[in-house]
Amino acid sequence: MMERRVILKMTAATFAAGMTQSLFSPASAQTPPAPAQPIAFDPTHLVEQARELAKKPFVAPPTDLPEPFTDLTYDQYVGLRAKPDAVQWVKDNVGFEIEPLHRGYIFSAPMEINLVVDGTVQRLAYKASDFDFGHLQPPLNIADIGFSGFRVLQPRDNAPAIDVAIFQGASFFRALAKGQAYGVSARALAIRTADGVKGEEFPVIRAVWIEKPTLAANALVIHALLDSESVTGAYRFTLHPGDATIIDTECTLIPRVDIDHFGLALMQASYLFGSLDRHHSEDIRPNVYDVSGLQIEKGNGEWIWRPVSNRETLQISVFADQNPKGFGLLQRDRNFERFQDDDQHWERRPSLWIEPIGDWGEGSVILIEIPSDFEVNQNIIAYWRPKQVLAANSETQFAYRQFWCWHPPAQPPLAHVTGARSGKAGKRRRFMVDFAGDILGDPAQSGDIKANLWAGAGTISNVRSFPSRETKTFRVSFDLDPGSETLAELRLVLENGGKPMSETWLYRWTP
């Protein structure tokens, strides 16, 4: 399995395919000089620009760089940091700072950065004197090579500014809630993810326009122009940092061709091993993962919890729905003892919850589990795949809210899964699933709870229940005999008189 750095390098290579003539000259790898006269900013013009871009063939952005930036190692690249004076708005008391990020390593393609100040556009120009190059010796005269993206920082009194978000590489971005460490990543748009026939297409953010905020607003507005072989798009991200960092996303998509496989609100995270799949039993740590599972609040009100897993083979799961109320990859384990990792602190990784705005119609939440041997690989992917086809030259709008959080804002009013384990039981596989919730301690509702268990293949036996009204918990253990089957879908929900008392636990067993 390829390292995540290699995967991202492939992503960057896809990104490295040419800025459009409306933004960059195809004959030059350099960004154009800033205009002599200030240009007024109008967000509606960005949609017009996406329309014009969609009428032209896709042109790949330039990736040529001067030495020594062409073949940087990871360690060399992270040594390239903007100097304090190059960080925007540091002294302006607006609640945010913008740090431009250097090109190089896997981030060789440029992203044009524009600042919107007092209603006018100011293109941020690259100057070598703005960067500390670490141990590298850059040439004396470096042209304006642009930037690979930017970091959003939040200043603090008498302390260094803290990270809030990073936009860098294709249409990837990440964000943090207060006190968290980077983990799950998001993408603005997905095209043909995990398509083994046509292959995946990675749309790119060609340029951004960042509005200078006010301190009272505590919000940062970022406009972005997206482009790929199949589609262009105008995006607006409104970022609200806090105990949960919220990013409101609005987009207008304009396809060049018909698109029948696209994904909204894609997110990806790392999962190496846990209590359901200890393939790395020699590791000194008990668990290693960014997220523990996928949660879905379906349009009909059903709550689903699907633990994720590091598979031996690629697995794609489809959860059909109509007008979903929410979904996300969650880190439910917030106790250091679960991971025992003083360096990575997996318990501090964000959960990412998506709340659709407006009706999304028919479609499916897609979960992709990719085999991985390295904890840096983001091998777990989830997104919403609409049933609708995006017709060429049409315009379609979508909106949703992202919660980068410790706990999602929507919680099931039922018992929830607190853990699941699996191990050998002779020739069978034994599972143990734990539920907890106030509803389990209520005598009026928990008097006759039964475990409703189903398997799509194989045989279930030895089902046992261990309720505890005092601790408000309920444990279910059972054995699965798969026989000759190599895949079995499992479904478990606690019920009382046919009424659900818990979220629905789903799991796909594979050898």
Image (cartoon, rainbow, N blue to C red):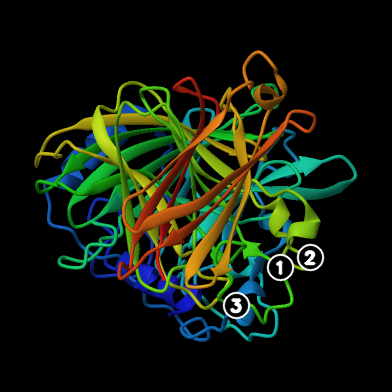
Name the residue rendered at 70%, 79% in the picture: 134
* Mark pair 2, 1: CA separation: 7 Å
Residue name at image x 81 percent, y 66 percent: 342
Comparing 247 with 451, the one in front is 451
Contact between marks 3 and 2 (CB within 8 A): the answer is: no
- CA neighbours of label 2 inside 10 A, class few (<14), some (14 to 19), many (20+): some
Q: Which of 224/120 is in front?
A: 224
**x and y, in percent, of residue 393 in the image:** 10, 39
Q: Quadrant of the N terminus?
A: bottom left
Q: Is residue 120 above or below residue 371?
A: above
User: Label 3 is placed on what type of residue?
Assistant: His
| Residue extending farthest right | 158
> Would you name the residue on which mark 2 appears?
340
Amino acid at pointer 1: Pro
Q: CA distance from mark 1 to mark 3?
A: 9 Å
Residue 42: percent from left, percent from top = 37, 28
Q: Which residue is mark 3?
A: 280
Where 201 falls versus 263 (above or below)?
below
Residue 180 in view (yes/no): yes
Q: Position of residue 448 (x, y in %)?
A: 59, 23
Instruction: Report how many numbered discs are placed on residues in the image.
Output: 3
Q: Earlier in the sequence, mark 3 or mark 2?
A: 3
Instruction: State which quadrant residue 118 falls in.
Output: top right
* Mark seen at residue 286: 1
- Closest to the observer, 307 or 331: 307
Amino acid type, mark 2: Gln
Residue 474 lies, with reference to residue 449, above or below; the image says below
Q: Secondary structure at mark 2?
A: loop
Q: Earlier in the sequence, mark 2 or mark 1?
A: 1
Q: Given this view, does label 2 or label 1 mark the residue nearer the observer?
A: 1
For label 3, count other residues whose C-alpha is less than 10 Å away and answer few (under 14), some (14-19) or many (20+): some
Marks 3/2: CA–CA distance: 15 Å
